[in-house]
Amino acid sequence: MSKSNELAPFFLGAYAENNSVFESIWLEFYREHVSWRRGFHPEDEPPIKADVQFQPQYLQSIAKTKQSLHKLSAKLRQSVPFYHPRYIGHMSSDLLMPGLLAQMITTLYNPNNVCADAAPVTIDLEVKYGEKLANMFGFNTVPQHFPCAFGHLTSGGTVANYQAVWYAKALKYYPLALQKGLANFADFTLTLNQHPLADHTQWQLFNLPFDQIVQLRIDFFKALQNCTESLRKNILQQVSQARIEHLGPIDFFAQHPGLKQPLLLVPTTAHYSWQKSAKILGLGTQQIVKVATDEKMRICSAELAQLMAKYAEQQQPVLALVGVLGTTEFGTIDPVADMLTIRDSSRAQGLEFFIHIDAAWGGYLSALFRDEQNQLRAYAELKKEFRYFPSPDLYAAFAALSQVESITIDPHKLGYIPFGCGAFVCRNQAARGFMVEDAPYVFTGNKYDSPEPQLGQYIFEGSKPGAVAAAVSVAEEVLPFNAQGLGRLPQLTITATEHFYDRAMSLAKELAPHLQLNIPIEPDTNLICLAINLKGNVNVGRMNKLMERLYDRLKVDPSQPLQNKSFIASSTKILKAYLSKEAASNLCQNLGLDETTLVLDVQQSDQADHLFVLRHTLMNPWLIGEHGNYIDQYLDYLKDLIMQEVVAFSSSK
Amino acid sequence: MSKSNELAPFFLGAYAENNSVFESIWLEFYREHVSWRRGFHPEDEPPIKADVQFQPQYLQSIAKTKQSLHKLSAKLRQSVPFYHPRYIGHMSSDLLMPGLLAQMITTLYNPNNVCADAAPVTIDLEVKYGEKLANMFGFNTVPQHFPCAFGHLTSGGTVANYQAVWYAKALKYYPLALQKGLANFADFTLTLNQHPLADHTQWQLFNLPFDQIVQLRIDFFKALQNCTESLRKNILQQVSQARIEHLGPIDFFAQHPGLKQPLLLVPTTAHYSWQKSAKILGLGTQQIVKVATDEKMRICSAELAQLMAKYAEQQQPVLALVGVLGTTEFGTIDPVADMLTIRDSSRAQGLEFFIHIDAAWGGYLSALFRDEQNQLRAYAELKKEFRYFPSPDLYAAFAALSQVESITIDPHKLGYIPFGCGAFVCRNQAARGFMVEDAPYVFTGNKYDSPEPQLGQYIFEGSKPGAVAAAVSVAEEVLPFNAQGLGRLPQLTITATEHFYDRAMSLAKELAPHLQLNIPIEPDTNLICLAINLKGNVNVGRMNKLMERLYDRLKVDPSQPLQNKSFIASSTKILKAYLSKEAASNLCQNLGLDETTLVLDVQQSDQADHLFVLRHTLMNPWLIGEHGNYIDQYLDYLKDLIMQEVVAFSSSK
């Protein structure tokens, strides 16, 4: 059976081929829900009498409902056909049928995953799913080993990213607060690295590794056991009041005058939620350092190393370094392994920062890298399955994930789960204790029991749908996070991307007499861009106009019937501001463009501050198969569009 | 037709009486979705071949899906039966069938409401629903009139509350940034209240009313029209860099040394998301002032007035005052009208603050107060429908909503929509412009066009489910926000609460020889608490133990079959710390308790820092009807439980 046929049972399908399976499964479980309702207290009289259901007023109300739904359903016919292999635009596709069904069924029960009281079933599913995600990244989830990871769902990647900043702040500032809070308790001693806590400098305390901060708090709670109840309360209050969460940033920094404001480093390609996070979470956007990306649209390791060395020397604190595993615009993968190396050398210089990976897009590719025993697959074995993927540095990036502090991943992207479903995974579950309002002091023997508070206390959100937890949980059970399970999907779509790449290169050769067509950024994942420039044109402004005209034929247009679109793609801008001089120069040269027309500040119409390119997200499992090859079809279609432009361009001369 | 029968067509029902209607409607629209999939490019060959669907490997995969769903569905039978009138616990109930169906149908299409590109249909539904919410609160939504309101959905009330803080910060600090940013442009003059902007003090600039801040920005953009392009860019950059969003709180306050850190005032009863908001959003919890609540668990107006007068005198800035329209624990309604009066007198003293109403719970009661022309109904007319509801101050609170700045409301509570669905409504849509990254300078003639950016730029979240927008939109179309529409639901449930009240009072009389039973807090909405103390006991600690034993019989217990529970209620704590001395004393006296055993700091087991009470949320439309009276049944059941305790207590003597 072909690989796409193997996945056929898991999607409704482009022709809704699994229509009757979906319908019968849904009906079975809907009817079970009905029977469940009737089983709670069977002795009760049904409140709605059947004779009421035949009265005109009742029927009118049903009619009203149907009318409103008819209107909705009619409008929905204008929806974007994400499910179809002709849709290669944004990060949306058909949905995993097991997840979709689980979500629809569970919505009937409407559990609220804010606490176990409101969701006895689905909270447990969410916690377990968090562990599965953690395992896929290589984190430990065996409670007997330290650190033990955890994960949970969010409404989307944006909120998971905010939460990473919240966690980083709560932990990084804690040792300073602890030192300050204990200052008045001369008899209460706490040791850190064989020295009294009081003897450490502010710089040292801000630069402790994640696990050491967690351990420091555990040591603190252990030491509290030897205090009287009233002393313990007093100390806890003083420490709590020395924290930035209590004081706010202004008073906290006033109490630590030697400490500079920490920076948050992100690549220039980072999602705009990072910029938003600074505005919202009490940093300023000036604290965000956008690190240059190289030609591959990955964070530039050399630049990053230089920056960190400078910060270490200047004692400029860094809150966190964010890497992107699959950029939103280009799908490119930051060099996570290099980031770890840079962290090691920074650590040697006394500078410590958290690493958060925004894997909203690329996180689920990790399934490809895991075998059925959740071991990292050998490079050579993986390599055999593809023509180009994965390069050694890409492999290293995925292998390095287990060493970072926290990760954002979006089930509603490559998890093929309905919107909105994001997730946050953290390497050390004891971090949750730093978020909880009331200081816990529960001990069992020698072991510090991390509190099991209500989810609402340590997550960003409050009430949240348990149905989403059911969706991800069933999807994972059916297609677990390994190369034989969910990994088959990226296996298929990356192969499709490689085919796209090869075919685009042939097309480039074929059309070389008329134009330059190229792939401006080497694809790291199943996302691929195209840039096209006609022979005879050298200015970027004019190339962009051509590209925009092409895109007009490929974009969603609610004013036209859906069927008018042969294919739907998306577009993006490669900003001059994000490119190194060399990268900009190469890009222009490859397209036959005069690089002086790609500028930072546009003054004339032949200039532009960006290259406008076509962007293709290849998520659909049926791009290539016995039924046809949509990638070939697309490129043939694109060729026709381009040739029309060539003719128009020649006749305009 | 009785009122509950009128609502019968809109819920699946306690016995799933509308089972076949639900099923047939779902099937109709599911099948329409199938036909839609087939209509996109009918010439395409279906990728999944029928012969594949009969192969063993395919069938095994379907079996795997079914098995996983069987497991899920079996577990879901342990779900909390929110839908049943025997469930009177948390803020959950049966769901509105039109909304639920709309959500399930739309999930098949999976639109993403982050931008119109990904949701051509449902973004429009979300925007229109935001306007309907705004209208229900009395806000204007006619664009020709100023200010014009807007609203949008969030994943829940917690995020909507965060967003209110974000908006308040963005606007309140803006005039200060504008003054600072323009400082180097002597020739560029801007007038505020007939005086040059430069002449205003920091205190004055922080204390401008909402609409005036918006107008100031409009005036600023108008004045920019007369500048050269390069000057305009320069000015915009300087202003942008003077904003707190760029500088962060520390540098911003360093640039405005005369300005104290502003406070955020919330009642002691406020939801814990407010405390969390301070930790997350760059305030400190020390900037949160918890204003005392009176015996009715409403914010104490006298105390609030005193505080504000003090702040005005001390030039202590206030970011916002939060009122709660339906507290989470008691359902009580803060005196919004008094808040407006206090704002007026503060304004006269130069102190200006935003008012945000957290109406997560009570917001939809507003539908009761609106007629079919969206006019506020007369008090006398409304009063006729109830025995006690609404008191004149309650009516005044709802009537005053149109004067506040922003409101949180949760469709997933009294909107009877699945989790998670919250909403944020703001009186002035021009506020969105303050959130957008790029400074807009688009003008049409004399009119300032507020930008229409992608939703993602001015909301807290990013990708979000369009299916939820379809749910609320269809629900509203079927049951619009007026007394004849959605208002019929609170009409019914508040009536049920009044019946509960009367019956509990009778029960109190009947059981008076044995115990004191009372309603510790007068219900403002359809949420009612009960406290019970046996004759002969005077200490709070002991009373709480009795209450906890009663609650054990009424709480969800996953270790037992669901059917073992006759009724499911919830519990809450009335904290000593939140009560005035008088209120604490009265509460204790009414229960025959020694008030010295209700303490702030527990030292002995007979003491407690709270009263543990039973809490009942009456959301179900079928609590009282021809089929029976669940409230009477519940109180009879409770009486039995109590009498068992009386016997046990007597025999223990």
Image (cartoon, coloured by chain):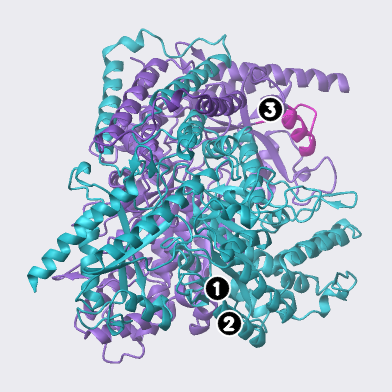
Chain colours: A cyan, B purple
- SS at mark 3? loop
Q: Residue B625, image x and y in percent? A: 45, 15
Q: Which residues are magenta?
A: B531-549
Residue A398 vertical position relative to residue B98 in the rendered view, above or below = below
Q: Amino acid at mark 2?
A: Leu
Q: Residue under label 1, please give it.
A: A265
Whether residue A268 sits left or right of residue A130 in the image: it is left
According to the image, label 3 marks what residue? B558
Name the front one of labels 3 and 1. 1
Amino acid tagged 1 = Leu
Report helix, strand or loop for mark 2. helix
Judge if badges 1 and 2 mark residues of a common chain.
yes
* Residue kind at label 3, given as amino acid type: Pro
Q: Are marks 1 and 2 in contact (CB under 8 Å)?
A: yes
What SS does tag 1 mark? Answer: strand
x, y percent for residue B273: 56, 52
Chain of the residue displaying label 1: A
